Amino acid sequence: MYYDDLPLWGFVGKVEAESMSLSEKGTKYYLFTHLLFDALYNGNQVIEIRAFSDPEHVVDITEDVDIDIEFTYSVSWNATSTQFQNRMEKYSKASLLPVRQKIHWFSFINSVVIIVLLMGLLTLLIMRRLKNDLRKCSNGDEEEDKEVGWKYLHGDVFRHPSNIPLFCAVLGLGTQLLTMVCILFLLACFGVLYPYNRGALLTSLVFIYTLTSMVAGYSAAAFHNQFSVTGWERSVLLTGILYLGPFFVMVSFLNTVAISYGATAALPFGTILVILIIYAFLAIPLLGLGGLIGYCIRSEFQAPCATKQIPREIPSLAWYRRTPCQMFIGGLLPFSAIALQLHHLYASMWGYKIYTLPGILFVTFIILIVLTAILTIGLTYIQLSVEDHEWWWRSVLCGGSTAIFMFAYSIYFYVRSNMTGFLQLSFFIGYNASICYAFFLMLGTISFRVSSVFVRHIYGAVKSE
């Protein structure tokens, strides 16, 4: 539990495997009914607080019967010379213990090695081959020109993808979520947000998501208007419901479960009403305003090569060149670089641990983006080399596939934890699914943007030569 943003731990009961009495055998369960709080203060501010259970006030709850229990507590106030601005140093030092420090360093070294290897692989195997392909095209030799498979896709590679409104909505939401995460890291670096104040963090998420709705509307409308000046309204509408629609359904279900269990995790009706008012009177207008700005300053899609009217037939592909296999490769390597930090993050969210190193988390996030970009360029080039020009949606799927591994690891984390019961299971699965879905949209958007720059570069180089 937390008091004035200070975390504290305590035992609510105890379990005795064997009874001390010969007449009573088996496991006994006891509940502590009195808590002792030891609070340290400086002036009118709380500096530190600890909780202790009183072993003299226990109730036997082994029998499955209804029982009325009266809980009590007492507080001991003691003065301290520690200043208020230094009260969090105790928890920050706990996160820098030698064992944890070694784990963090190992995680960083692992990530850096993977990045170096991937960059070397990209440089040696892809860039060298790309230069050879461009050289063959510039020589004009028909025999060598036949070996350059991706060159024949110049009339199809810039054909806009199917279901363009949904595609624009994914890009708009991904751009919004990326902007929101960057703002959160910026606030954490300036000390505005810190991991102990979860209430302020959740409040910031609501307001930052609301204010960045303009970014989502603008990104979706601007990209849609590059291909068509009509129908951008549908793209903006999908942007508004593509993430919040499933999220609202999930939160409603979890709130119903919490109310049925009588848990304090249920959101009060007043809080829900305030969030709905903020979304209706602030987020939706900003989303529409962003879409209108994207429509007013629209620009036509400038492709380096003209697009043919009839699409080129895609040859039959081997199983390892198809979308599922590429998604597996594109998701596994970035996930392996962030797995250890992801474990610490899950432990902080669900294991009542404290993550006090936002700087390391930010560097890990940058590593994740770099790895996603590198792998996306390589997988897109491989796809074009086998004359498959439908790279738009596949780049999104390959980049976002890391989120699938993140969700799978969350299931593994739950199985290894001590969490039980339908209430904990539903909350764990629901909120982790929402987080991983957000990462899917964000990483998928980054993946497409990087692939688009790469494809424009290579086909622009062919045209210039």
Image (cartoon, grey):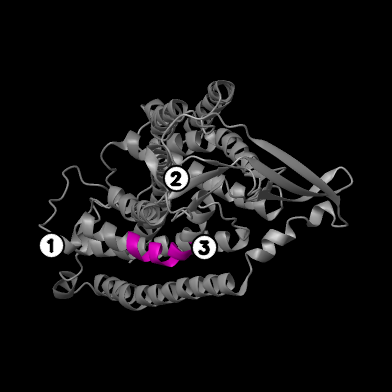
Measured Cα–Cα span from mark 3 to mark 1: 34 Å
Q: Which residue is mark 3?
A: 364
Q: 149 or 438: which is nearer to us? A: 438
Indicate whether 271 appears above or below 388.
above
Instruction: Name the one closer to the observer, 249 or 143.
Output: 249
Q: Earlier in the sequence, mark 3 or mark 1?
A: 1
Q: Which residue is mark 1?
A: 318
Camera-side residue: 5 or 183? Answer: 5
* Gap in angstroms between the C-alphas marked 1 and 2: 33 Å
* Identity, as a three-letter code, of the amino acid under mark 1: Ala
- Furthest-front residue in view? 23
Q: Earlier in the sequence, mark 1 or mark 2?
A: 1
User: Is residue 39 inside the magenta stretch?
Assistant: no
Q: What residue is shown at x 49% (from left), y 49% (from top)?
A: 350
Indicate whether 157 appears above or below 180: below
- Across and down, in percent, residue 374 comes to 39, 65
Callout 2: SS: helix
Question: What's the CA distance linking mark 3 and mark 2?
Answer: 17 Å
Instruction: Look at the numbered disc 1 and give the secondary structure of its residue.
Output: loop
Residue under numbered circle 2: 435
- The residues colored magenta run 331-341
Under mark 3, the amino acid is Thr
Label 3 or label 1, whichever lies nearer to me, is 3
Q: State the image quarter where residue 431 is shown.
A: top left
How many residues crowd around disc 1 within 10 Å: few (fewer than 14), some, or many (20 or more)? few
Determine whether 22 is above or below 277 in the image.
Answer: below
Q: In this rendering, would 261 be left or right of 58? A: left
- Image-based side of 418 in relation to 349, left or right: left
Magenta segment, prevailing SS (helix, strand or loop): helix
Work out whether mark 3 precedes mark 2 in sequence or the reverse, and give the earlier one: 3
Which residue is found at the position 29% from the left and 47% from the top? 393
Screen quadrant of the C terminus: bottom left
